[in-house]
Image (cartoon, rainbow, N blue to C red):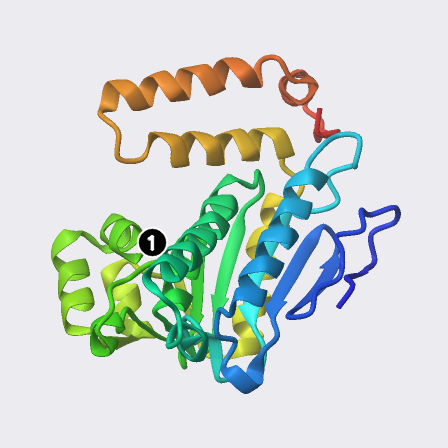
Amino acid sequence: MAPTSSDPGSTDLGSYATLELDLTDGILTLTVNRPQALNALSQQVISDLWKAFTAIEDSCTHDAGWPVRGVILTGAGGKAFVAGADIREMASMEPDDAAEYARSAQGVTLLIEKVPVPVIAAVDGFALGGGCELALACDFIYASEAAQFGQPEVNLGLVPGFGGSVRLPQRVGLGPARELIYTGRRIDAAEALRLGLVNRVLPTRQELLAAARATLGEIAPKAPLAVGLAKQSITGAYGLHTGQGLEIEAGLFREAFTTEDMREGTTAFLEKRKASFAGK
């Protein structure tokens, strides 16, 4: 489905068989739309997500006008964010096919981490296996009280293949991640919040989406290049030795000084006026 938009002159982000896009006031709501399959990550969904996030990344330039300032990633139907990988497709895969399937999904998660705008996973219902892994690639995870998280791959004789064994320990710590992955246990939104897996829990889907939109609305007026550089710094430095991380940070701090937005921001501060950032 092609994106609808209230942004004058916004970039065409394409149309997709399994995704719905809505761009309003710089905030793109990207909905995985396979409710009959609980939004499972078929090869088509993975391909569509790759193309959509590539289009988002390409739009993040001054020439394109930075039409997208933030993304809400969610699922259709009310029962699932993304229930997991597509088991029907996986059942007939040979080992090499499975490796290719995993690498293509991992590529999407890396792209989500790379796009220079914040991405919030708005989880309502199941986020299991690949769905949990997709959410883990996002900058923030907001959940409704109906959300459930888990890495149940061991129940199928499998292991996480879309980043769960890497990103889940980073979010919740090594011990809790091992327990969740080895047991295949599901946890509710309250437990996910306690573990630090999610940032916020909201009572309903409507309140969940409103909260995600409010956060992105708070970020949208900021200098888009600075937000993108901050994301790059955090993602690039995470897990490195402190000295290595500081080198990455210093380099990106320097890069910020090459932007017109930095000059505008500091000048506006000194002149006691609101900055107007052009994204260049």
Quadrant where the C terminus is found in the figure: top right
Q: Nearer the viewer, residue 90 or 3?
A: 90
Left or right: residue 181 compared with residue 25 = left
Q: Name the residue at 63% across, 45% down.
A: 54
| Quadrant containing the N terminus in the rendered view | bottom right
- Within the image, what quadrant is residue 101 found in? bottom left
Give me the residue at 22% from left, 78% from top: 155
Nearer to me, 2 or 172:
2
Q: Is residue 211 among the parts visible in the rendering?
A: no
> Which residue lies under the disc numbered 1?
163
Q: Is residue 231 left or right of residue 28?
A: left
- Identify the image quadrant of residue 89: bottom left
Residue 259, by quadrant, is: top right
> What x and y, as percent, mark residue 7?
82, 52
Q: Is residue 182 left or right of residue 204?
A: left
Which residue is farthest right?
A: 8
The foreground one among 275 and 236 is 236
Instruction: Decide: is 243 above or below 144.
Output: above
Residue at 15% in and 52% down = 174
Element class at badge 1: loop
In the image, residue 77 above or below residue 168: below
Q: Amino acid at mark 1?
A: Gly
Q: Position of residue 71 (x, y in %)?
A: 60, 54
Name the spot of residue 225 as percent of width and height, x first. 61, 29
Is 30 situated above or below 205? Answer: above
Question: What residue is drawn where x is 43% and y is 60%?
Answer: 135
Is residue 126 among the parts visible in the rendering? yes
